[in-house]
Image: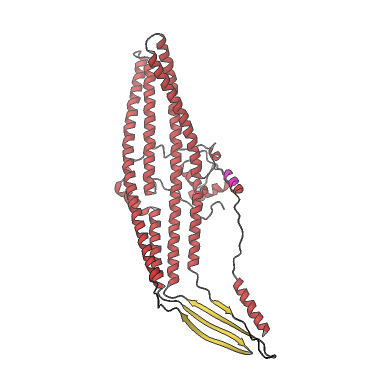
Amino acid sequence: MQQSARCSALLLVLSLLTGCASFQAKPLLPAETGAAFESRTLDDPSLIRFLEINLQHDMQPWPPRSWNLELLTQAAFYYHPDLDVARARWAVAEAGVITAGHRPNPSVAFSPIYVSNAAGSVFPWVLGLNFDIPIETAGKRGYRIAQARQLSAAAQFNIAMVAWQVHSRVRASLLSLLAAERAVVIVQRRLELDETIVQLVEQRLTFGEISQHEVTQARIALNQDRLTLQDLQKQRAEARGQLAAAVGLPVSALEQVAMMFDPLEQAPNGKALSDREVRRAALTNRPDLLGALADYEAMQTALQLEIAKQYPDFHLGTGYSWELGEKRWWLPSLNLALPVFNQNQGPIAEAEARRQEAAARFTALQAQVAAETDRALASTLAALNKLATAEALLAAQDQQQQVAQSLFKAGETDRLAVASAQLEYETAALARLNAHIQAQQALGLLEDAVQRPLDQSEVPPFSLETNPRG
C-alpha cells in the first residue's frame, strides 16, 4: 500500500510539471541599448533584406545613391520604436487569444488522515483523492475567444495607424528639409544680388547721384538676407535632426546621406481631390476607425459573455480513499452554483454600459474625422489657390527680368535696374517656394485626416513581425 501511495504521488507531481514554462531573465541595460541606437545606420545588411522583402525588388546598388520618401519610410518601419511598441501590443493581444481558448483545468485534492488510536496491526492512515472536473456551459469559451480575436484585430489596426503616423512624420520632416535646402539656394542668390546692388549704389553715391539713405537701405537689405541665410542653415540642420528622429536613427546616420525629394517637389493635383471620395475614404478606411469598430465588437461579445454567465458551470466530482484496509470509490457527483441571490445583473449592466461607451467613442471619432477632413480639404484647396497666384507672380517677375535684361543690352537702362529686377524675381521665387511648401503641408494634413496618400502613390507595406531586427 505504501508503494502504491508513492506511485500515485509521483504521478501527480509529474503531471503538474509536464509542459511547465521556465523563466529566462532578459535584463535591460541602458548602456547597451544606447550604444545599439548610436550604431544604427542606413547601410545595415539586415535593412537591405527588409527592404527587398517589402518592396519586392533587388536593392542594387547598395546603399542607394540617394534616399527618397519611400525608402526613408521603409527604414522607419524597420527602426522606429513606436512600431516596436505597437507590434508588442499586438503580440500581447494574440497571446490573449490563446488564454481565452483555455479550458479550465481539473483539480485533485489529496487528503491524508492520521488515525491516532488505530490498532497496532492496522495502517494508521486514511488516504484519499478527490477529483473535480469543471464543465463550462452556454458557450462561454467561444465568446471569450471571439472577444480576444476582436481585440487582436483592434491591435492590428493600431499597428496600421502607428505605421501611418511614422510615415507622416517622415514626410513632414523631409518636406521641412526640402524647404530649407531650396530656400538656402534662393537666399544665396539674393545675397549675391544684394552685394552687387550695394556696390552699384555706393558708386552712385560717390558721384552724388543718390542719397546716403538709399545706400543704407541697400546695406540693411543685405544684412537681413545674411540673417535669413543663417536662420535657414539652422533650419536645415534641425530638419535633418527631425528626419533622423522620424526614421529612428541618430543624427550622425544622415550626415553623408543624399536626399531625393520627389514627389514632394511636385505641386499637389487639386483636380484629384474630390470632396465626396476624400470624405468617404476618411469615414470608412481609417485604421483608427476600424480599430474602434473592432473594440465595439469586442464589447458586444463581452456583453454576450456576461449574459452567458447567468447559466452556472457544472463541476463533476469523484474520489477514492483507502481507509483501514478498505478501498472506497466515490460515485460521480454534479455540483453547480444556484443563481438564487443574483443572476449576474451587475456585470451584465457594466458590459452593456461599456458597449454603449464604445459606440459613443466610435461615433465621436467618426465626427472628429469628418471635421478634420473638411477642414484639411478646405485648407488644401486654399493653399493651391495661393500657389497658383505665387506662380503667376513669379512668371510676371520673370518677364520683368527679361525685359530689364533686353533694355540693358540695348543700352536703355543700367546694371542697377537689371540687378533690382533679378532681386525681385528671387523674392517672387522665395514666395513661390513658401506657397509650394504650404500646399504640400496642407496636403499632408489632408492625408493625415484620411490616413492614406492622395498623390496616386501607395503607403509602403509594413511588417507585422514582432521584431523585424531580430
Locate the N terminus and report the quarter of the image it occupies. bottom right
- Answer with the quarter of the image where residue 175 lies: top left
Q: Among all residues in the image, which is located at the extreme left?
A: 276
Q: Give the range drawn in magenta.
A: 34-42
Q: Is residue 190 left or right of residue 128?
A: left
Is 35 one of the magenta-colored residues? yes
Q: Nearer the viewer, residue 331 or 442?
A: 331
**Position of residue 230 measured from the top left corner of the image (x, y, whole percent):** 47, 29
Q: Which of 60 and 470 is in front in this view?
A: 470
Q: Among all residues in the image, which is located at the extreme right?
A: 120
Q: Report the residue at 40% width, 11% height from top.
A: 205
**Position of residue 30 measured from the top left corner of the image (x, y, whole percent):** 59, 48
Q: Among all residues in the image, which is located at the extreme top?
A: 207
Colouring style: secondary structure
Q: Can residue 353 be seen in this view?
A: yes
**Position of residue 403 measured from the top left corner of the image (x, y, whole percent):** 33, 20
Is 125 one of the magenta-colored residues? no
Q: Is residue 267 visible?
A: no
Count of marks overlaid on the render: 0
Q: Is residue 406 left or right of residue 24?
A: left
**Position of residue 397 measured from the top left corner of the image (x, y, whole percent):** 34, 25
Q: Which of 29 and 232 is in front in this view?
A: 29
- Answer with the quarter of the image where residue 442 lies: top left
Q: Report the residue at 50% width, 66% height from top.
A: 99
Q: Work out whether 228 lies above or below 76.
A: above
Q: Work out whether 147 lies above or below 9.
A: above
Q: Is residue 19 left or right of residue 356?
A: right
Q: Report the residue at 61% width, 76% height from top.
A: 12
